[in-house]
Image (spheres, helix red, strand yellow):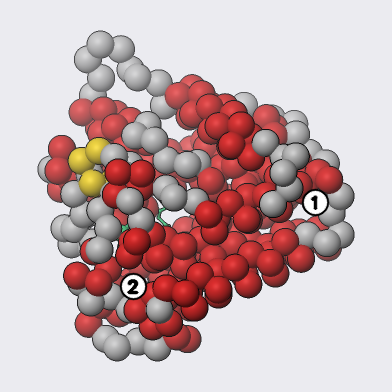
Amino acid sequence: MNPDFPLKAYLDERKALIDRALEDFLPAGGSDPPLILQAVRYSLFAGGKRIRAILCLAAAEAVGGKAETVMPAACALEMIHGYSLIHDDLPAMDNDDYRRGKLTSHKVYGEGVAILAGDALLTEAFRVLARRKSLSGIPAERILDVSREIAEAAGYQGMVGGQVLDIRAESERIGMEALHEIHRLKTGALLRVSLRAGAILAGAGEAALADLSDYGEKIGLAFQIADDILNVEGDPALLGKGTGSDAARGKITFPSLLGIDASRARAEELVIRAVASLFSFDDSATPLREIARYILVRRS
Ligand code: IPE
Ligand code: IPE
Ligand code: MG
Ligand code: MG
């Protein structure tokens, strides 16, 4: 860690900026908002680290762009992530009761509205990307490329595909290779595209984009290994979600295949390699280097 970098203040400040921008995209809607807006806002503003949005902004800055210019894309990524969590918690999937320290959407609004709140967030993300005033000043081709990349990373070739493999794997004794693939798709794809989106919109060259993709792949896997470890030994009060559920469901995870110590060592190695991917970047990539290290020590 770089002791001079104020990581906590940085993350807090970024999170506040992102929350404010999300609030502008999805305002409260007066004193009697429609039920769907209540449900969407309930989950979206329940907290959350906003790490995908933070990565998007930081990637733009690492290639010389400005964070505020790419903020709509950062918000779109958080909307897609929020949708994925609402659906992930449903009884038909992980059947979890708590998320971000609050009851899950289906516990409060019922399954039907929770499914639709997820649908609404997913759809809203692409509306935000396509609004003329959202990413004004950025060439339309870049916005098209980013929209397509986000769709690919979120859809059947990415996160959704990974979620399907993940639920199928509950009834199989999968090995390390299959587990890697699940983690790469269900979690890695969206983290990786968060970096690519920020960088592409900011006009990154091919070499920088390739390095940031590499970094994203590595922290994506490290992030899900850390999530698996936290499910074993995290503090539910800090995490805002239950622990022990993977073991209870007999899920194959990094800790169940390798044990906690070897899982942590694997995540550490990935973070070292992620930071190494940023070798060609100057100080503008300091936040990305520090975020990679934070993934290992995070408690929520
Ligand atoms: C949780 O993601 C689900 C995974 C993909 C591991 P986060 O840990 O980023 O959740 P929030 O957004 O901070 O709640
Ligand atoms: C979540 O994976 C991945 C997505 C939502 C795409 P998990 O099911 O392992 O994450 P948590 O532990 O519920 O947050
Ligand atoms: Mg899941
Ligand atoms: Mg889950």
Please name the residue shown 35% across and 87% down the image. 174
Q: CA distance from mark 1 to mark 2?
A: 33 Å
* Ligand 3 within 8 angstroms of badge 2 C-beta: yes
Classify 133 as above or below 288. above
Query: In front here: 281 or 189?
Result: 281
Classify 67 as above or below 115. above
Please name the residue shown 53% across and 54% down the image. 297
Query: In front here: 264 or 186?
Result: 264
Instruction: Point out residue 137 in the picture as x, y percentages from the top left corner.
Output: 75, 31
Between label 1 and label 2, give the one nearer the viewer: 2
Residue at which label 1 appears: 204
Residue 201: tell me if it is visible: no
Do the CB atoms of the residues marked 1 and 2 lie less than 8 Å apart? no
- Quick one: label 1, few (<14), some, or many (20+) residues within 10 Å? many
Residue 246: tell me if it is visible: yes
Mark sitting on residue 166: 2
- Quick one: label 2, few (<14), some, or many (20+) residues within 10 Å? many
Please name the residue shown 35% across and 19% down the image. 28
Classify 257 as above or below 224. below
In the rendered structure, the answer to whether residue 47 lies left or right of residue 149 reads left
